[in-house]
Structure formats: C-alpha cells, structure tokens
Amino acid sequence: MAEKFDVIIVGAGPAGSAAANVLAKAGLKVIMIERGEYPGAKNVMGGVLYRHQLQEIIPDFLDEAPLQRPIVEQRFWMLDENSAFQFGHKDLSWAKPPHNNFTVFRAQFDQWFAKKAVEQGALLVNETVVTEAIVEDGRVIGVRTDRPDGDIYADIVILADGVNSLLAKQLGFHKELKTSEVALATMQVINLPAEKIEDRFNLEPNQGATIEVFGDSTKGMVGTGFIYTNKDSISIGTGTLLSDLVKNNVRPHELLETFKQHPMVRKLIEGGEPKEYLAHLIPEGGYHSIPKLVGHGVMVVGDAAQLVNGIHREGSNLAMASGKLAAETAIMAKEVNDFSENVLDTYRIKLMESFVGQDLKKYKDATHMMAKQPQYFNEYLPLLNRAASEMFTVDGTSKWDKQKKIIGMVQERGMFKTAIDLYRMWKVMK
Amino acid sequence: MMSEPLKKVDIEELQYLTRFVSDKESHLVIKDHDICKTKCKEKYCTVFCPGEVYKWEGDRMFVGFEGCHECGSCRIGCPFNNIEWRYPKGGLGVVFRLA
C-alpha cells in the first residue's frame, strides 16, 4: 500500500509553497510534488513580488529571502513611435523596511520558499510530473505520477500546477483556456553593472524602479511592456493577449526585440549582456475565468485558479494568499475529519471575500473590454502623445489655438464616440 | 497596425541563452499532419510560438520540442486543436535559472 499523506500539493510555486508552509507548521503530513529540476525551474515572472502576503507566512523573510531590489519608483509610459507620455510615483519610504514590493528571480525565490516549507516538515519531491488526479466515487483521493509505482494518496489534493492546470481540466473544473484569456509574455534578463542601473534609473544602491509601458511597446495590441531593475541586471519583456498575437500574425520575440530597440528604451539597456530568454503564459481572464475551485478532496490555488490581477500586475501575492486560505481550510477539515466539497468550500468563500476575490471582481470586465475595443491601445495612446506634443511645442501658435487643435483631434474620432469610450473605461475600472 | 516591420531575431542565438534538458521523445505531438497540410493555410503556430518550435517543411510540420518553453500557447492557439500537449517527464525540458 502506497504511503498516505494529509495533503498532496501539486506544484512548488508561490501558491503551493505558501500552502505547504502553513500546513507543515500546523503539523500536517504534507508532500509537494514539483515537475522541475527544482522549484522555480518552470516558473517565470516579470519580477515584482509584493511583500504583504509573504510576510503573513514568513514574518522574518527580509533576513533571508533571495530578493533583488526593493521598488521605490513605479513609472508608467504611454508610448508612441517617437514619444512617450509619462507619469509615475516615487516614495522613498518604500526603500526602508518593511518595503512594499521587490524584484525577485523566481528560480531563486521559489527554491527558498519551498525550502522554508521543508524546514517546517513538508516533504519536497522534485523532477516528478503528476499525470492525473486519482478519483474514486467522485472524490479526489490522490495523484498518479510519472515515477514507477508513483501513486500517492492523501485526504486532500491542492492543485497549484500553474496557468495550464491540466489537472483542473481533467477534473472538469474548467474547459480549455481561450486565446483571449491568456497573455503570452516573453522576457529577457540582461546583465548590467549595478552602478549603471542606478545612474540610468536615478536610484541609490538597493533601490529599484519599474516601468510599465503601454501602446507602442505592444504595437497597439492589448498588453504591456515592462522594464524592471534587478541587482545587476534588467528584466525586460512584453506580454500581449495570445488572441492578439494570433490575429496580427506577430512573433512575440520580435515584438520584444522591437521594444528593446525603441528609442525610448534602447539607452536604458545599452551595453547589457542578455543572460536568459523566457516565455510563459499569464492568466488574464480574471474573475470570469476563475474555474470551479473546490471539489471533494481537492482545492485549486494560484495561477491554476487564474488568480491574476492584470491591471495591477499582481499575481504571486494572490497565489500566496490563496495557498494560505486553502491550507487553513485543510487544517479545519482535518480537525473535523471531513474532506467533502461542502467543507472545503470554506476556502472558496474566504477567497472571494478576501482582497483576491474583491480585486478580481472590481476589474472583472476590464481585459475583456479592452480586447474587444482595441481603440484604447491603438488610437487613444497615440492621440494622447500627439496632444502632449502639440501643447508642449512652442511655435508661435497661441495656447487657445493649440487647445482647439487638440479638440479637433478628438472631434476627428467623434466627440460622442470618445465620451462613450471614456465612460466605458471608467465603468470597467471603477 | 504597424508602420514598420518588427525587428528580426536570430532565434537560435536567443534560445542559446536558455537551458534545456531534452527528453528523447517529444512531449508535443501533431495529432493529424494532414490537418496542418490541408486545412491550416496560415500555420499560426510557426509564428506565435516563442521558441519557434514549429517549422513548416513544405509538406509536414516539424516539431523541435527540445526548445520548448512549455508555455502552453500552441495547445490553446492551434485553431484546429491539433496539438497534443503534455509536460516533459519530470526534471526534463526547460530549466529556467533566473527570472
């Protein structure tokens, strides 16, 4: 008879390791199954990790977690071919503990986070693929792996198997993802000496900056470009809805290369040495794409549950929050010795009541609307740049006349149409 | 959409930056080669795949699974649902070292 655990966690990313930390600390018998050579080997993130949810699980993470730079400035560019309308916010209090967010390398961070769970008593098995959930009488009772005699049993299985979540699909919790529900992100890590980064981004040592770039970075497709500072490198990438890439016949790596060579971007990474190229899907469907989260003996967390707030580029913190809530529910279920869907549904209720569910609800229609209404990215952002260029170019035209000219640009689109577009944008963001 | 074409990329050079530990057999399988040949004029997967894993060889789709980032785009993006997509065996496939 195969060994039996209290909880099997499939995937040792932020959601899985968050759950494992909480469960192992409570004394439950936990196994994490990771398909990569090590946790993080299959995982990709632009790089911004928020502090709060991590600190709830590892209070003294600052002393030991492998972090790159605490972020003190978040910039936003509305990019056109030869111009950029820019704004941002810098807060130097973020340079001091407890900080707000950090850039991290996931291959390092995920290994550390999983190791913390192992220190609490969780078992971590790497290089093992879970090929299916073992279901008996409508209950998930374990998992089948690609190891010889690889069946493992538990009272509860937590699916933290990432955006593609083939296991949740196997259970019928979601249908195949649609191309409009996911963004394909490609990125590169480019080595650059720390002093150069600090000079180019106006930073002190151990301070970081992020730039989110809309518009020409994705050639008007729904998505963003990003530029994040690590200790001795820059992470630069672009991500667009897969549906837009397919529709426009675009190679994602050529889009990234074009972004790298954009005149507003080129100098920031000049002289840098590319060290790694990575591609990954990001769940962008939000609230409407959340699958069935709970079944008899099973809960779904993190990217597998499509828990990403694309508007605020939050994901790994949502993953940790969901992992923690699932673990707390598992502990409660163990106490009452009932692992039915009815009991585990506590997880879903708590998740939807938390900031995770609330934030996803707030922006539930945002990505869908932008996917259907491409004018925000491919018309308004260029218009914004033209208007700013007009207003700031001194050429003997009076400011009143310039204002008229700008209003004329809007009228070209149609005042009414623009008013509707503004209202529509407000409605999905409010 | 674009006033100028996108910058070209030497995919080999790009992929060389990433570590892959190859399996002997492919985790990506074209279900029916005839569909690629007769039904799919556009050969979408040869364009949107970030590793350029798929190459049309005139009469057959070549699958260079060794350079797969395991993102899942091809499984979702193939309009004919013609790609069988699994994870590579434990420990094999792409091994990201940084981000």
Image (cartoon, rainbow, N blue to C red):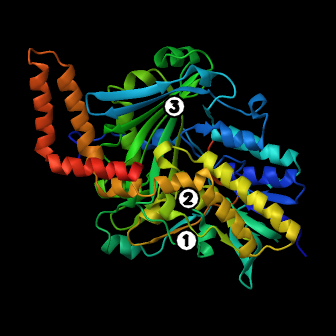
Which residue was labeled with disc 2?
A306
Q: CA distance from mark 2 to mark 3?
A: 24 Å
Q: Secondary structure at mark 1?
A: loop
Between disc 2 and disc 3, whose residue precedes?
3
Residue drawn at (75%, 54%), measured in percent from left and top? Answer: A19
Q: Which mark is residue A228?
A: 3
Residues flagged by tags 1 and 2 on a common chain: yes
Q: Secondary structure at mark 3?
A: strand
Residue A209: x and y in percent read: 52, 26
Q: Are marks 2 and 3 on the same chain?
A: yes
- Secondary structure of the residue carrying tag 2 is loop
Camera-side residue of A111 and A15: A15
In the foreground, A226 or B17: A226
Cα distance, mark 1 to mark 2?
A: 10 Å
A150 on left or right of A47: right
Which chain does the numbered disc 2 sit on?
A
The residue where tag 1 is placed is A174
Image: A390 above or below A40: above
Q: Nearer the viewer, mark 2 or mark 3?
A: 2
Residue at position x 72%, y 56% in the image: A325
The amino acid beneath tag 3 is Tyr
Q: Earlier in the sequence, mark 1 or mark 2?
A: 1
Quadrant for the N terminus of chain A in the image: bottom right
Residue drawn at 60 percent across, 59 percent down: A352
